[in-house]
Image (cartoon, grey):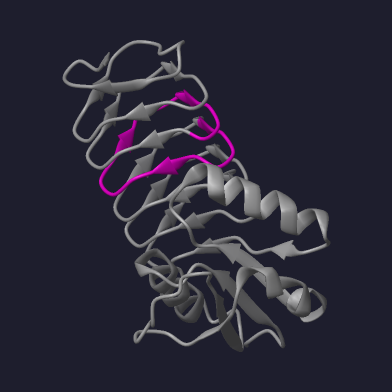
Amino acid sequence: MLKNKRLVIVGAGGHGRVVADIAKKSGAYCDLVFLDDSEEINEKVHVSGKVSSFAEYIKDSDFIIAIGNNAVRERLQRMMEGEGACFATLVHPNATVGDGVKLGRGSVVMAGAVLNSCAEVGDGVIINTCSSVDHDCRVGDYTHISVGAHVAGTVTIGSKVFVCAGVTVINNVSICDGCIIGAGATVIKNIDSSGTYVGVPANII
């Protein structure tokens, strides 16, 4: 049964449309509203207003920030929560979420993604299409695990980390806050200094 509630999606680009599709397939909301500051005409979705108009919807809506940039997602979610906005957690029906998994506010798990037993995912995290986070991992707030990235068991990933498409992270390692792990890289040891890491094995550039 649909909730008697709307979902406000902040961001009307491609990522926002994917988030909307997850919300529709979950059957959790009776109405979807897009807010976006772009001046370009968006012919694929109806944009109801600027981001600054979010307060109009606080009383009877849940929110989600559908913006890929980790820092922007954090700034907007924290600001809106400070004004009383409630944030949804969305999981695609074709994702696999194991026993004991914890998902934070404003996080999204997309189609084909796998979260295995006792993984913990913070607030505002994107677990993107066909990625995987194995057992007992910890993923910090406002991190993005991109399409086809695979994180082995008992890995700790900090906040605002961008794990790009096709990355592999072996088990039992940690990645500190604010890193970028470049597409196709393989992380085989702890990363203790923020920066951009690429290659097999991954090294800072």
Residue drawn at x 77%, y 79% as measured from the top left: 56
Q: Is residue 90 left or right of residue 77?
A: left
Q: Is residue 75 visible?
A: yes
Residue 152 seen: no
Span of residues in magenta: 138-160
Quadrant holding the C terminus: top left
Q: Nearer the viewer, residue 11 or 1?
A: 11
| 198 versus 70 height, above or below | above
Name which residue lies at 75% across and 64% down. 86
| Magenta region includes residue 156 | yes
Q: Quadrant of residue 53?
A: bottom right
Residue 46 placed where, x, y %? 47, 87
Quadrant location, the N terminus: bottom right
- Farthest front residue? 39
The mark total stands at: 0
Q: Which residue is found at the position 39% from the left and 20% from the top?
A: 195
Considering only vertical position in the picture, is 27 above or below 167?
Answer: below
Is 98 covered by the magenta stretch?
Answer: no
- Image coordinates for residue 161, horizontal then vertical, percent: 46, 33
Please say if 35 is above or below 108. below
Residue in the foreground of this view, choosing between 87 and 98: 87
Query: Is residue 20 found left or right of 104 in the rendered image?
Result: left
- Where is residue 194 shown, x and y percent of the image? 45, 18
> What residue is drawn where x is 65% and y is 68%?
63
In terms of secondary structure, what is the magenta stretch mainly?
Answer: loop
In x, y percent, where is residue 112?
Answer: 32, 58
